[in-house]
Structures are given as C-alpha cells and as structure tokens.
Amino acid sequence: MRVSRRLATAARAAAGLVLGPLTAAGLVRLAPLTAAGLVLLAPLAVAGLVLVAPLAAAASELAGTWFVLAHYKDSATNNPDFERWIDKIWVIETNGAKLKWNEYPIVVFDDPSGRFERLGTNRQSRVLNWWEPNEGQLAEIYAGLEINPRGAKSKSMLGSDAEGWRSRGAISGFSANTLSYTETWTIEDVGGLPVFTIEESLGGARTESLDGVTEYRTTEVVSPSELRGRYNRDGTRIGTFRMIRAGGVSEVQGSGKDNNQRVMAMFASQMGGGEEMAALLSQGGSPKDVPEDVRKEVEAGVRKLIEDEMKEQGMDPRYFRPQVDDMTRQIMREWERGKTPEQIERMIRDGDIKPRPIGPMR
C-alpha cells in the first residue's frame, strides 16, 4: 500500500539524515542495509564502533549507488536558452576483474519539488528549470530512491584503473544489409578525476555511421561521496553534473499499466507541460498564414521535441517511430485546426492526443 511505502521511506530518510553526512564526509562506507538496520547501526557508526575494511582499489571506491544530476542547455533546439536537467541512478559493481555499470534513467522521489509541477490537473509536468535537491530530497537520496526499470541499461567492463575500463564494442560479422546499434561505455582516470563516457553508433556496411557521445568529465572531487564536473552530449547539450553517493535502490511498485499505457503516460507527463511546446507552436503565428516552409520547420521541431523527451526517459525513438509519427501528426492537425498551444498541451495531458498502440516487436 502507498501508506506503508511512505512509512518505509520515512524510516529510510531518517536513517539517511544520520548516515548521509557521515558518508559524504568519507567517514562511513556501508553496504546497503534495511532501514531498520541503518537506524540501529547509526549510533554505533557515530560512536566509531563500526569497523569497515578499507577499500583497496580506486575502482572499488567508485563502486556503489550514485544519484547523477546534470544541468544543461541545448543549442540544437528552438529554445537554446531554456534551462534543462536530467537525473538518473548509476550502480557500479565490482566482480572479480570486471566492473559492471548499471544505469536507471527513471528516478522516483516522494517529494517532486523542483522536478515536476502540477498544472491544474492530476498530471505532473516536467519543470524547465535547473533544480538542486532540497534537504528532504537529499535525505531520500541518502536513504535510497525508487527506480523504474524501464529504459535501464547495463554494461560489463574490462580493464584496469591505470588503463581505464571499457565495455565490449561492436560485434563483427554482420552482412552488408544489416544495421547495427552499439554502445561503448568507458571510465577513465579512475584514481584521479574520473571521466564517464557513453559512445553510441548506428550504421552498417552500406550506410554512413551515425555517432553520438555523452561525457561526464569530473573536475572536482568534493568528497569521497560527491563528484562534480562538466556534462556534454554531442557538443550541443552542454552544462554541469553532480554525482552523490546514494543508498541502495528499490524497484517502484507496479502501477498495473501495460506497455502502451506507460508510453502514453510518459508522453502526457513530459510533453504536456512545456513552455518549449508553446513557444514552438507560437513561432509561426496563425497556422492559416504560415508559409509551407515554416510549417515544415514547426513540424520538424515538434518531432524533435518528442524524440528528445523520449531519449531523456531512456526510450530510443528509433524503436517507436510509428508512435512519434502519429503524435507529431496529431499535434500538427490540431494546430492547423486553430487550437492554441495551451489547448494542445491540455489535450495531451488529458489523453485526447496520445500515441498509437505499440505492436509486437520484430
């Protein structure tokens, strides 16, 4: 039940308030424990009675759960000055001579302040503004957040602290007619200022390769439990990031929704609140007076906005092409009928504009 979950979260948060500052100061390094266990151990930790074996290698110092928050601006959008953000959970594990890097792009806070806001309905809209976790949200981070496994990725990595860690690259042997998508993840300068890189590549023997790079380059080790640095995705999304050591995560309780409903909910919550959507649809004035070339620019902008929001939610739009096309077509149709941007946003939030059902994957 939701009430019992809130009680459990409150217990974890209370423990996080005690152990969080100690962890941030590098004084306590504990494996994820239950909320009750943390509460019982906290006085012992404060008294210095809990003995924890020192970590031997720099890679092991990165092991654990991290909350990652990036602030950036996107020069490739129609509104390059908008303040944007993305947050996620990283779990880095050691396994003999290997590292395992897990990424969860959908993070759930009990307190949505700064991240989402309500716009007069029961649905929440993503805030276009840089945010930092408040005291209560920090307590949630220290205690352990909930994650949605949708969009989660994981890579096993080989290497060393000296040479860096790298996941397996592309697999050879595809035919000339095959398109392949690969991601290569690397961690470099582990013992100094770590650099986390995700390289994406889509291509084939007869096609030009499409590549993308996301880099988190550490510039400051604030403490053993907090890193800060520069964020850069494809040279267009540029800003800063912050990594905070977090408590162990748990999977969010199921909502009972099927895959279609989850995708529709994502569209409604992410696309339905947007100053950016309003600005995009307003740039051409009345659709009756808009030249065809401007109309095409607006349509391309709507499509890109949908794709960008999907990417930020860990969904690859290439696998949802019919849904992207359908949403773009519906939004443009309502705009051409004379609907205002505010009315279109309301239709998205209320489910009057929604993506087509998802068919079986091939």
Image (tube, rainbow, N blue to C red):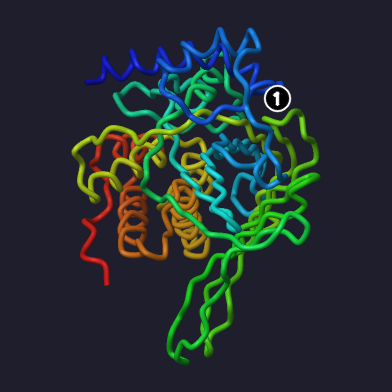
Q: Is residue 168 left or right of residue 236?
A: left
> What quarter of the picture does the C terminus occupy?
bottom left
- For badge 1, the amino acid type reads Gly
Residue drawn at point x = 60 percent, y = 31 percent: 245
Q: Secondary structure at mark 1?
A: loop
x, y (%) of residue 303?
A: 44, 57
From this viewpoint, is residue 340 visible?
Answer: no
**Quadrant hosting residue 125:** top left
Depth check, front residue: 217 or 93: 93
Depth check, front residue: 42 or 344: 42
x, y (%) of residue 4?
A: 27, 16
Depth check, front residue: 96 or 77: 96
The residue identified by callout 1 is: 26
Residue drawn at point x = 30 percent, y = 53 percent: 330
Residue drawn at point x = 58 percent, y = 57 percent: 98
x, y (%) of residue 126?
A: 46, 33
Q: Is residue 101 left or right of residue 241?
A: left
